Amino acid sequence: MALSPSRTLRAALVGVAAGAVALAGCGSADDDDPAEAAATGPAGDFTPVTVDNCGTDVSIDSPPERVVTIKSTATEMMLALGLADRLVGTAFSDGPLPDQYAGELDDVPVLSDNVPGQEALLDVEPDFVYGGWESNFGADTAGERPSLADFGIATYVSPAACQEPAYQPDPMTFDELFTEIREVASFFGAAERADELIAEQQALLDQVEAPGDGLTALWYSSGEDAPFVGGDIGAPAMMMGQLGVENIFADIDATWSNVSWEQIIDRNPDVIVLVDAAWNTADSKIERLEGNPATAALPAVAGQRYLRLPFPASEAGVRNAQAVVDLAAQLEELGL
C-alpha cells in the first residue's frame, strides 16, 4: 500500500510521541503527586520483552501508552488487566461489555464497528495494536504488521487465533489462555494483576465438576445451509471439555468448521450449545432447528435441550471461565 505524505507525517508524529514517552520514563514519579504516580500505571515491574507471536517477533522496550484493540477478546483482556487507561481506540466489538466493565470505555473512541482501516487507526496515533484475529491485520484492513511496524507501531494477535500450524494451539487449553494473559501483562509490567486474574479464572473453573459427563453436545455457532460448528482444537472444545460433554465433531481437527445437517442428525447430540450474536441470535437458531422437520425430530430439539452463551464468550478470552460456570448451571437445570 502506497503511503500518502499525511500518513508519513503521522508516522513521524507517532515516533516523536514514543520518544517523549521514553524520555518521561527516565524520571521517577513524585510519591507526593498521586496523579503522576497513577499515570505510570502498573508498569513498576516492567522489563523489556520480545515474543514470537504467530511467527512475528514483537519487541516491547517500554510499556505501550496508546493502545488500540480490535475484537472484544482483546478489549476485554485489557480491561481485565486493569489497563483501560491505555486505550485510545477500540473496534469490532462482538457484543456488549460485561457489567463489571460498565463505563470503562465511555471516553474511548470506537474506530469502527468492524476492522478499522489503516487511516482511521493512524489517526489516533497508537503505539500498540492488539487484534483478536490475524485477519485484523491486512492490506485492506488495519494494515499489515510489517507496515505498521514501519510506523513504530507494535502489533499482537491473540495466540489462540494463530493460523499457521506451528503456532496454532492444538488443542486450545486454559493453560494456553493463561499464557496469553501473562504475555500481554508482561508488555505493561502488570505481572501481579495477571497472577490475580489467573487465580480468579482458576477459581471459577474449580467450581465445575464435569456435569455433562456421559452426554454428547453440538456447538452451533452460525450458518444455515452449512452449519458452522465447534471442532476439536479451539475454545468451544476447551469449554466442552470442562463441562465433561463429548463434542459430536471431535473428529474435526479445527477450531470451527462447516458441516452438513445430515451429519448433525446422524450424530444426534444430547444437548445443543447455541452461540448468541446480535447478527445471528440463539433464538433464530432455535427457530431454524424447530422449523425444519428433520432437525425438529432430534430429541435435543424436541426437548429444547439448549445451552446459550454470548458470542464474545465463544472465542478464547477472559470470558471463557465464567462461560463454563454459566453453561454448567444451564446444563444442570436441564436435569439430564
Image: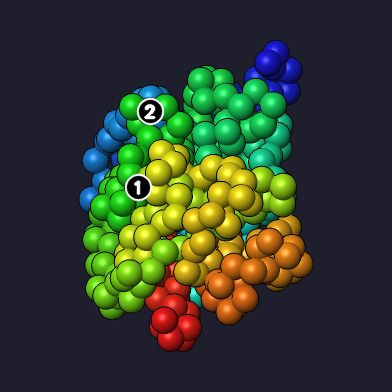
Taking 67 as reference, is 330 above or below it? below
Residue 244 sits above or below residue 13 on the image: below
Name the foreground residue: 274 vs 317: 274
| Quadrant of the snapshot with the C terminus | bottom left
> Does residue 197 appear in this view?
no
Residue 306 in the image: state x and y as whole percent: 56, 73
User: Disc 2 versus disc 1: distance between alpha carbons?
Assistant: 13 Å
Relative vertical location of residue 231 with respect to residue 303 in this rendering, above or below: above
Is residue 245 left or right of 4 when viewed as pictured?
left
| Element assignment for label 2 | loop
User: Farthest residue in the top direction?
Assistant: 2
> Along the line of sight, which residue is nearer the eye, 135 or 65?
135
Neighbourhood count class around disc 2 (C-alpha, 10 Å): few under 14, some 14–19, many 20 upward: few
Asked if 232 appears above or below 32 in the picture, the reply is above
Give residue 165's mark: 2
Camera-nearest residue between 10 and 128: 128
Q: Position of residue 117 (x, y in %)?
A: 70, 34
Residue that appears at 24% across and 40% down: 47
User: Which of the labelled discs sits on residue 172, or is there none?
Assistant: 1
Where residue 106 sits in the image (x, y, percent)? Answer: 64, 65
Instruction: Please give the name of the residue rendered at 33% of the width and 69% of the height, measured from the top-left corner.
Output: 214
Left-right relation of 306 to 203: right
- Residue found at x 59% / y 68%: 298
Q: Earlier in the sequence, mark 2 or mark 1?
A: 2
Secondary structure of the residue carrying numbered label 1:
loop
Name which residue lies at 26% across and 67% down: 202
Task: Tell me which amino acid carries mark 1.
Answer: Met
- Three-letter residue code for mark 2: Pro
Q: Using the rendered image of the protein, determine whether residue 275 is visible from the camera's viewpoint.
A: yes
Rendered location of residue 249, percent (x, y): 45, 50
